Image (cartoon, rainbow, N blue to C red):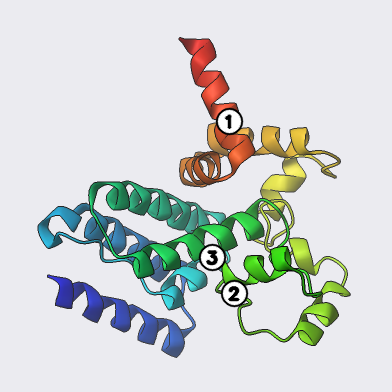
Amino acid sequence: LRAIIQWTDKLIVKTFLITGGNETLRIAACDFFVAAASMSTLLDDVATPSPAIIYRLLLSQTALAIDRVCQLLVVYKNAFQIQNVGLDRVAIYNCFIWDFCSVLWRCSPLPFSHSTTENNMARERSILFTDLPQQSLKGLHEIEGVASSLSLTDSAAFMGYARLFSSKFVNGKEKVKYLDTLKSEHAMKGLYNFLATFVHSLAERKKRKSLKKT
């Protein structure tokens, strides 16, 4: 079973490289790995997708595919809690979480270019920019809008939804309301569940809302 999952992973990556990928393939890849995560009890381990797949899903052109990969990462969190997996695998998964939260919510996919203990730690947690020279980072920071270009407010995949909600997001409260709207009116539960699980302020908000209901 593990060999089949690994073989399929490589096949998906090759298909992305040959065809450039399409949304049907991206969604099918998500569905396959959701099934793989559900079979973790049979493997006594968790077979995660390779970074090559995860980051191609993050760079999808449609909100639907991004919503599905976010839900996939939540499914894997539950699988990790059930299984006792190696620290190396958890470290890679944590990089996925760090990068997705930075890109989608914090609008800051780029770590700071100057070297400090905190900034260097942020780079170590990221797969996207681990090997990018500081001079290249500095140049990217100087390009207007690059930091938010993949976010759920400014990216091409989400821009239509964002503009329907507001012409400009002036504060965090508006962005939270926008996230609620994506869940309630556009059925993006995967994106909502992911951010409400891994972004501390949103997780605390979700807890408070649950307490009020009880």
Where residue 44 appears, as percent x and y from the top left, is 15, 59
Under mark 3, the amino acid is Leu
Question: Residue, x 23% and y 53% (percent of image)?
Answer: 83
- How many neighbours does mark 1 have within 10 angstroms: few (below 14), some (14-19), or many (20 or more)? few
Question: Residue, x 45% and y 9% (percent of image)?
Answer: 214
Which residue is denoted by mark 3 in the rendering? Answer: 58
Which residue is denoted by mark 1 in the rendering? Answer: 204
Question: In screen coordinates, is 123 left or right of 166?
Answer: left
Quarter-of-image position of residue 98: bottom right
Under mark 2, the amino acid is Leu
Measured Cα–Cα span from mark 2 to mark 1: 27 Å
Position of residue 133 relative to residue 62, above or below, is below
Helix, strand or loop status at disc 2: loop
Label count reads 3
Under mark 1, the amino acid is Glu
Helix, strand or loop status at disc 3: helix
Residue farthest along the bottom direction in this orientation: 18
Please indicate, yes or no, whether residue 62 appears anywhere in the rendered image.
no
Give the mark, 3 or 1, whose residue is nearer the N terminus: 3
Position of residue 91 relative to residue 130, above or below, is above
